[in-house]
Amino acid sequence: MSGSRRPRHGAHADQSERWGPFDNQYGTSLRVYDPEDDIWRVTWIDPCSDFRADLIGRAQGGDGIFQEGTGSNGMLLRWIFSDITRDSFRWRAEISTDAGAGWHKAIDLLAKRTQSYWPPPRRYSPF
């Protein structure tokens, strides 16, 4: 999996492009922070497979980030980001095709930064 990430509109939104762990995946995520509800509204679009996911994300106790929502095919989705460090994180994706009665692991991977970009350059601009 590889990709890039660009902050948008200060700290209230960002966009990332990603090439997925499967050969037929390419897409982009848009995450927008909703300060009133203290959540992130997340949309993932994969034009290669004509798939879209809409999720709500929030911090889960100090254990990571939990996102849940629905895919364009009707499946329920859970994306769990945990074991987050400056240079790595674990991402688990789970799906349910029976309205949440059962969950199946779709992805479980450890992402590791290949080059450190922190702290950002003094005059960082995402554009």
Image: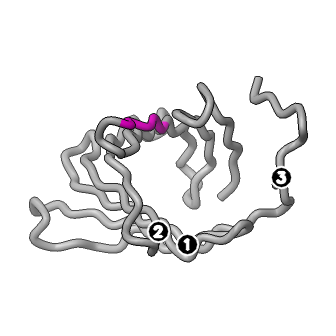
Q: Distance between the residues labelled 3 and 1?
A: 21 Å
Q: How far apart are marks 2 and 3 (CA)?
A: 21 Å
Identify the mark at residue 90; answer none if there is no mark. Answer: 1
Q: What residue type is labelled 1?
A: Arg
Between 113 and 19, the one nearer to me in the picture: 113
- The residue to which callout 3 is attached is 119
Where residue 83 appears, x then y in whole percent? Answer: 56, 76
Between 78 and 39, the one nearer to me in the picture: 39
Where residue 35 appears, x then y in whole percent? Answer: 38, 37
C-beta proximity under 8 Å, tags 2 and 1: yes
Closest to the camera, between mark 2 and mark 1, is 2
Earlier sequence position, callout 2 versus callout 1: 2
Total tally of numbered discs in the picture? 3
Span highlighted in magenta in the image: 31-35
Identify the residue at horizontal 32%, vertical 61% (top origin). Answer: 78
Mark 2: give few (<14), some (14-19) or many (20+) Cα within 10 Å: some
